[in-house]
Image (spheres, coloured by chain):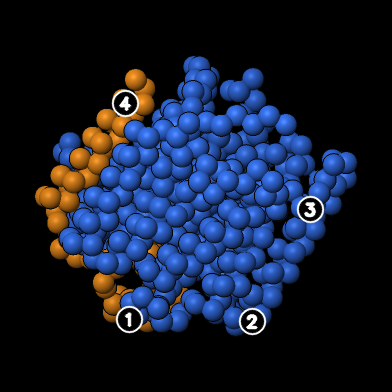
Chain colours: A orange, B blue
Amino acid sequence: MKRVVYLVVLTLCLTFAFLDHDSNGVAYNPLFHSHDDQTDGASQSISMPCGLGGSENHKH
Amino acid sequence: MSTITKKIDLTVLGYAVLATLLFSFLFFTQVGNRHLYVFLIGIGLGVSLYHASFGFTGGWRNFIEHRISSSLRAQIIMLGLAVILFSFFIGSNSWIYDGKMIGAIAPVSVSVVVGSFMFGLAMQLAGGCGSGTLFTASSGNGKMVITLVFFMIGSLVGTYHFDFWKSLPSFGGVSLMNEFGKVNSVLLQLSVLTLLYYFIYKSDQKRNVNFKHSDIFDFSNFDLFKGPWPLILGAVLLVFFNVLMLQAAGHPWGITFAFGLWAAKIVQFFGVEVSSWSFWQLSYPSTALENSLFADPTTVSNLGIIFGALAASALAGNFFKASLINKKILIAAILGGFFMGYGARLSFGCNVGALFSGIASGSLHGWVWFLFAFIGSIIGVKFRRVFYS
């Protein structure tokens, strides 16, 4: 029974993600951006999901 | 020696396989082929994490409490391998797409010191780190599901307090590759890792008479489909998949950014104006918030880890293994999850994004994270006794 509840909850979470996908779409795909266009050109400081905002935060 | 053969959970395995096919199709047709690769790499990571039981929390605790070093030694070997391999690829063109790959370089700052200390302490309370929480929650561990929920909440609160933590002193990002050159950076990091390995195994050898270097290479119970896998195989595979992640996503493996994003999407659904918070106005987070969750590579790899761990636990016949949850353990899971989430936001990631990928990329913040998370864990192990006695 607990297994089924777990799978149902997981399915609900995935449904939320599907709804989000349906409503927002992929207007901008972060994997298709040109890294060098986004920063000051230093390849080591380009944005990535490291928490407080990637390259934006690396500059302070 | 008697062995108990557990039955494969076909329902759960079927669910994991169907979900994998569905999402593979979705990513390929609606998002992009690189997202499909990231998803499949996530599945490999999920299976490896589960079958090798590769977590940082228990390994650190075993060393702190009993000087048992097997897991910690496997982690050191993993870091050494990653440092060598990443040095060939960081800043080079990817095999998969037309562009350069970048390292996980983040600032060395007061927020990293506080956040990593907080994370190290909290992960001992929760009984799982960033990757550990995700793969154990995915394999049906109820306590870790609660931890994951509060991890998300903590991450979100961390983003709310972004301005304060950003205002504290910081040296900025320090790339050892940029400072000393690739070869010197690799030699320096390997020297430190070798010294660490020596100190760790000497401590173990002194305390435990049965110490063996070979324990992490033990393939005697190895079963490819059902597990367990030896720690060394887990370590090598995690490096292999992290290198593939670098090639496919353009940046190394990370986990916890997605937790904050998921929480932000949920509260936004209920009318909270998350997009007005300064963190969610930065380029990467704002892009992630405005777009589909399936466009966010960290979410995509996490989904892969979820289905990979789900399939692995079903193959092992261990899905939804009963875990004891009393009031004290529940509080530990809530506090641990919340402060891991908060700490991960302050310190630019968790044991994966900051420690593993950070050190592999030659980022000084990865080393600072390692040091202060370990100090936090030493204290966390003491606090843990209050909840798990």
Front-most of residues B334 and B230: B230
Q: Is residue B327 above or below residue B26?
A: above
The Cα–Cα distance between marks 1 and 4, rounded to whole angstroms, is 44 Å
Query: Which of labels 3 and 2 is toward the front?
Result: 3
* Crowd rating for badge 2 (residues with CA inside 10 Å; few <14, some 14–19, many 20+): few
Dot 2 falls on which chain?
B
Q: Nearer the viewer, residue A40 or B378?
A: B378
Residue A20 placed where, x, y %?
A: 17, 47
Front disc: 4 or 2: 4
Work out whether mark 1 precedes mark 3 in sequence or the reverse, and give the earlier one: 1
Amino acid type, residue under disc 4 in the picture: Val
Mark 4 belongs to which subunit? A
Residue type highlighted by circle 2 = Val
Residue that label 3 marks: B213
Q: Secondary structure at mark 2?
A: helix
Residue at the spot x=49%, y=76% of the render? B90
Q: Are marks 3 and 2 in contact (CB under 8 Å)?
A: no
> Separation of disc 3 and disc 4 at Cα?
43 Å
